[in-house]
Image (cartoon, helix red, strand yellow):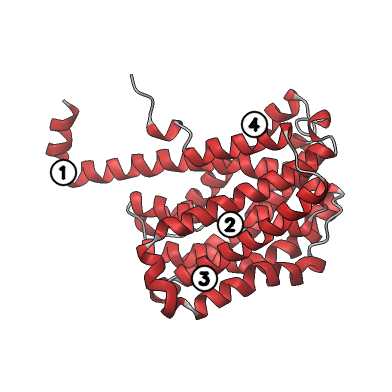
Amino acid sequence: MRRPSFLVPDNFTLALIGTVVLASLLPCRGETAIAVNWLTNIAVGLLFFLHGAKLSREAVVAGATHWRLHALVLVSTFVMFPLLGLAMKPLLAPLVTPALYMGILFLCTLPSTVQSSIAFTSIARGNVPAAVCSASASSLIGIFVTPALVSLIVTNHAGASGSGWHTVGAIVMQLLVPFIAGQLLRPVIGPWLDRNRRILRFVDQGSILLVVYTAFSEAVNEGLWHHLSLGSLAGLFLVNALLLAAALGLTTFASKRLGFNREDQITIIFCGSKKSLASGIPMAKVIFASQAVGAVVLPLMLFHQMQLMVCAALAQRWAARDMHHEHPQETSVRAR
């Protein structure tokens, strides 16, 4: 029997694993590290510039009026997740190292994903315009809220050396300013980007791989793998699974209890239970000390792959259920 497609790692996941292996075996040092760091900063700025140029204002306006949905997604992203991270501390402490727990708390402060939230909502036949607006708003608000939450909970509860509020200016300059510039230039380059989406995907994935390589190079130089045991990595996997299950369960319960229709429930579940690798890794690079970034982003990298696999399975299941309800006879014939 063939394995379900959502269980097969995609090329980007394999590239992430390969980048971590490369950084572990051949970490960059000295002048090379400085050059790669500059290249990474340029790539991240270009990434957010292109995201700003790509985002359709019409799509945002179309979904912006659904304020109850957006409020619930933002509460799930920036309130529920941090509370889960703090409440689970007695359970997490025996399973992971203090550095990994700091990474889990940082993961809990991050905004939602944009591309995958919209894609899964579309596959499952949810409210796509609302997903575009909600996920995009989460990403923008996270530029300011994530540093504040890092200062409030990560520094105080995990002994982090990073200071969120002191790095807001750096995050604004590196992420928000390019994004706004892209929005302003959308009338000029937006149509070209719509025709050449592969360029955005290349910059998106390439910038993340560069940040992962530089972060893990610095962490390996500081002895990352000497301080992490197989037991800690296994504990991290379990912790991420529990966190994702709790987020999916709570967003499902809240969206049903508050009376949202099925399309809106799908949007809330996918936008409110996921965390952004594309925003998280650049933010970690700015907020935390360079030698700590590798351990901080490790929980996020694992959570990213887990959320993609689980949400892909859910989206396919819900889409198939809709098809069955709409065409029960056709579905029955195919099953035979």
Lateral position of residue 302 relative to residue 185, left or right: right
Q: Amino acid at mark 2?
A: Ser
Point out the frontmost of discs 2 and 4: 4
Q: Reply above or below: 190 against 85.
A: below
Q: Looking at the image, is mark 3 or mark 2 earlier in the sequence?
A: 3
Q: Amino acid at mark 1?
A: His
* Residue where numbered disc 1 is placed: 327
Image disc number at residue 131: none
Q: Secondary structure at mark 1?
A: loop
* Residue where numbered disc 4 is placed: 238
* Residue where numbered disc 3 is placed: 52
Q: Amino acid at mark 4?
A: Leu
**Could you say where residue 266 lies in the image, as x and y percent from the top left?**
41, 53
Point out the frontmost of discs 3 and 2: 3
Q: Residue placed at 43% from the left, 62% from the top?
A: 131
Q: CA distance from mark 2 to mark 4?
A: 21 Å
Q: Amino acid at mark 3?
A: Gly
Point out the frontmost of discs 4 and 3: 3
